[in-house]
Amino acid sequence: MNYRMCKYCKHFGMQKGLQYCLKRNKPIFWNDFLCKTFERKINMNEREIITSAIRVFGEIAQEEVAIEECSELIQAITHKHRGREHNIAEEIADVEIMCEQLKIINNCADKVEEYRKAKIERLYNKVFDACL
Ligand SMILES: [Mg+2]
């Protein structure tokens, strides 16, 4: 098992598959940036916040959150189609944030961008063909 030292309190620990400080009962902050974040809230850009979420909660947990957020968006769309109140905008925001995390976790941001360009091109062709 790969134990890490918590830079915040210098204790070791692991629990539930996460790097966990058993003394503080919180995730281990092995990175200086996160140690400082724990002491007080500092300004973080979007990328830093997203990267920190993956480090603190773990890749598997965040992929599970991504699954949940996708299903919440599906549910919001269904509510809209049934004439019910819906929160599509909120759920789109959640899914976008989780997609950013998935790109980092799976190290595939460049591939996503390539696929995105190709699929936008394909969509353009479909729209063009439909208008003929
Ligand atoms: Mg949501």
Image (tube, rainbow, N blue to C red):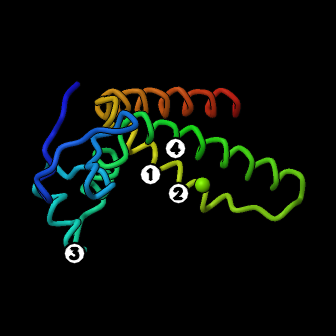
Res 93 label: 2
Q: Is residue 120 left or right of residue 57?
A: right
Res 62 seen here: yes
Gap in Å between the C-alphas at discs 3 and 2?
26 Å
Gap in Å between the C-alphas at discs 3 and 1?
24 Å
Q: Is residue 18 left or right of residue 120?
A: left
Identify residue type, mark 2: Ala
In front here: 2 or 104? 2
Gap in Å between the C-alphas at discs 4 and 2?
13 Å
Q: Residue at x 62, y 61 (%)?
A: 89
Gap in Å between the C-alphas at discs 1 and 2?
6 Å
**Residues tagged 4 and 1 counted as in contact (Cβ below 8 A):** no
Q: Residue furthest toward the right?
A: 82
Gap in Å between the C-alphas at discs 4 and 1?
10 Å
Look at mark 1 in the image and give the residue it sits on: 97
Q: Earlier in the sequence, mark 3 or mark 2?
A: 3
Look at mark 4 in the image and give the residue it sits on: 65
| Circle 1 SS class | helix
Q: Quadrant of residue 91?
A: bottom right
Q: Position of residue 16 (x, y in %)?
A: 40, 37
Q: Is residue 45 left or right of residue 93?
A: left
Q: Quadrant of residue 103?
A: top left
Q: Is mark 3 within 8 Å of ligand 1?
A: no
Identify residue type, mark 1: Ile
Classed neighbour count for the residue bearing mark 4: other residues with Cα under 10 Å, few (<14), some (14–19), many (≥20): some
Identify residue type, mark 3: Arg
Q: Residue at x 28, y 38 (%)?
A: 14
**Residues tagged 3 and 2 counted as in contact (Cβ below 8 A):** no
Gap in Å between the C-alphas at discs 4 and 3?
26 Å
Q: Earlier in the sequence, mark 4 or mark 1?
A: 4
Observer-side mark, 3 or 1, equals 3
Observer-side mark, 4 or 1, equals 4
